[in-house]
Structures are given as C-alpha cells and as structure tokens.
Image (cartoon, rainbow, N blue to C red):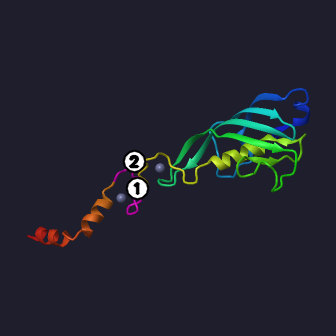
C-alpha cells in the first residue's frame, strides 16, 4: 500500500508539518532491475502550506543495487536524493509566475489523496546514475580475454600494443637469431 497523505486535513490547523516515514522498497514500484538489500527507504518529509500550493521538501535515504557499466558486476549505492517540489492547486499555464523550468512545480490533482510513494519513486529514478560505476577507477573488462581487470589484471592490451608496434618485425627478426 502506498502512503497517501491528506494534505487538506493534515494541514488544516497548521501551516507546517514534519514527518518521518520508512517505506518498504517493494512498495515503490520501481522498474524490475531495481533491488535493495535494505527493506525500507527512509524519508524525512517537510510540508509548508502556502495560499495556492504546498511546498514539499524531502530527504530520501535509500540503498540500491546497480550493475557497473564497465565491469558489469553488481554493486550497492547509497542514494540520498533531496527534493523540493511545489504542489500547485492551480493548473499551471504559461503565464504563471513560477515557470516550471526554474522550479520543480507539479500540479496537485487531488489534495486529499496525495501519493507520496510516487514522488519518491520519481526521485530515485531521476537520481540513479545513467552510467553506473562500481568505483571511479573501475578498470572494466578486458576486450580481448574478457577478464574483469579489477580482479584479474591481464597483459592482453600491452601484448596487443607490442605486436602492433613498428618495432615488432624487428623484434621478431632479432628473436630468430
Ligand atoms: Zn566496475
Ligand atoms: Zn585480457
């Protein structure tokens, strides 16, 4: 079950609320390739009520499993997106003072049934690196022998270079002697 917030009711007598949630990872409906060793994603949420909108601020703390784009090994990443969203009760048009590009403004369709899970899902998707790397200096896979060079450094590429070098013929001749 997703977390549904009744903004109208919860911010009826207050202009500001702060809450902590621990949301089961599997309830976020992330794409299949997403998994986590932690069962929950922790969220610290602040909501401020404005005249025609709610300003939402979130700190998300998640741990996701990704596949390295270089060595293809799975690894864990501590993903902690921070998000600020303005949920506008008014339909957004081109003339509105807040342009959608400057600020993260979203139209709030249903004030009484705001789905927090959906917002968290979006934030995690946006924050996932396009080219995940297990480490900045991951050496990747050898294109010649297929070894993971982080674990089994091979000499294939050096060998290749040596063979292609203009001196290789000379070396071969010298070797024959
Ligand atoms: Zn890697
Ligand atoms: Zn190799």
Q: Quadrant of residue 144?
A: bottom left
Judged from the image, the quadrant occupied by ligand 2 is: bottom left
Residue 124's tag is none
Q: Does 151 appear in magenta? A: yes
Please tell me whether the stretch drawn in magenta is mainly helix, strand or loop.
Answer: loop
Q: Residue at x 88, y 31 (%)?
A: 10
Q: Quadrant of the N terminus?
A: top right
Q: Is any part of residue 27 visible from this angle?
A: no
Q: Where are the magenta residues, as a range?
A: 141-153
Give the residue pinned by disc 2.
Answer: 151
Query: For the residue labelled by badge 2, is the local secondary structure a helix, a strand or a loop?
Result: loop
Q: In front: 47, or 93?
A: 93
Q: Does 104 appear in magenta? A: no
Q: Is residue 9 above or below residue 119?
A: above
Q: Position of residue 38 (x, y in %)?
A: 64, 36
Q: In front: 59, or 49?
A: 49
Q: Position of residue 131 (x, y in %)?
A: 54, 54
Q: Position of residue 66 (x, y in %)?
A: 58, 48
- Does the beta carbon at disc 1 come under 8 Å from ligand 2? yes
Q: Residue at x 11, y 69 (%)?
A: 174
Q: In front: 23, or 54?
A: 54
Q: Position of residue 94 (x, y in %)?
A: 81, 56
Badge 2: few (under 14), some or many (20 or more) residues near its Cα, within 10 Å? few
Give the residue pinned by disc 1.
Answer: 147
């Amino acid at each position: 079950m997703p977390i549904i917030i009744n903004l109208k009711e919860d911010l009826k007598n207050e202009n500001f609320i702060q809450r902590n949630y621990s949301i089961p990872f599997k309830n976020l409906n992330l794409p299949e390739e997403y998994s986590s060793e932690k069962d929950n994603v922790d969220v610290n949420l602040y909501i401020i009520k404005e005249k025609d909108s709610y300003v939402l601020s979130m700190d998300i703390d998640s741990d996701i499993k990704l596949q390295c784009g270089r060595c293809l090994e799975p690894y864990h990443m501590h993903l902690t997106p921070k998000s600020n969203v303005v949920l506008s009760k008014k339909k957004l048009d081109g003339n509105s003072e807040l342009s959608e590009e400057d600020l993260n403004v979203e139209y709030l369709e249903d004030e009484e049934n705001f789905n927090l899970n959906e917002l968290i899902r979006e934030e995690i998707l946006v924050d996932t690196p396009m080219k995940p790397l297990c480490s900045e200096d991951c050496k990747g896979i050898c294109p010649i022998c297929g070894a993971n060079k982080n674990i089994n450094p091979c000499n294939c590429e050096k060998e290749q270079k040596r063979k292609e070098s203009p001196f290789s013929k000379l070396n071969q001749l010298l070797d024959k002697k």
